[in-house]
Amino acid sequence: MVRPNSGKLHVRDQDCVFCRIVRGDIPSEEVYEDDEVLALNDIHPVASVHFMMIPKRHIATFGDVQSDDRDVLGNMMILAGRLAREQ
């Protein structure tokens, strides 16, 4: 699925596999999506509930996390538990 590049979608790396998934260049089976986060089923699950969450803003490594990423990453932690319970 190709997703529109909304004003809140800040994908900066054309070669990043996760950015390509967020843009819709690579198909995915979505579990959840909002303006800042995409959650999708893992393509090789090793547990009955196995999904990954991607911030729509490109963050290459944990070493690149900035203070302005605090809200989205915190929201992802809360969302992870909710989505796991719903699966």
Image: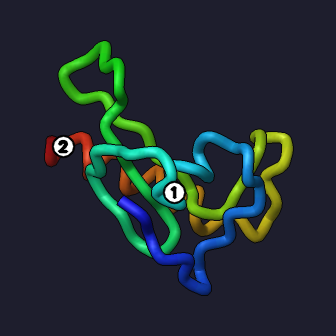
Q: Nearer the viewer, residue 8 or 63?
A: 8
Going 36% across and 64% down the picture, which residue do you hit?
Answer: 33
Vertical position of residue 46 compared to residue 6: above or below = above
Q: Nearer the viewer, residue 14 or 8?
A: 14
| Distance CA(mark 2)–CA(mark 1) | 24 Å
**Image quarter hosting the N terminus:** bottom left
- Residue linked to disc 1: 22
Q: Position of residue 85 (x, y in %)?
A: 18, 43
Q: Nearer the viewer, mark 2 or mark 1?
A: 1
Number of marks in the image? Answer: 2
Q: Position of residue 30 (x, y in %)?
A: 30, 51
Amino acid under disc 1: Val
Going 35% across and 26% down the picture, which residue do you hit?
Answer: 43
Residue at the farthest top position = 46
Looking at the rendering, which quadrant does residue 87 occupy?
Answer: top left
Going 38% across and 50% down the picture, which residue do you hit?
Answer: 39
Amino acid under disc 2: Arg
- Residue linked to disc 2: 85
* 79 horizontally vs 73: left or right: left
Q: Position of residue 47 (x, y in %)?
A: 26, 17
Kind of element beneath mark 1? helix
Residue at the farthest bottom position = 7
Residue at the farthest left position = 86
Kind of element beneath mark 2? helix
Going 35% across and 44% down the picture, which residue do you hit?
Answer: 28
Looking at the rendering, which quadrant does residue 55 occupy?
Answer: bottom right
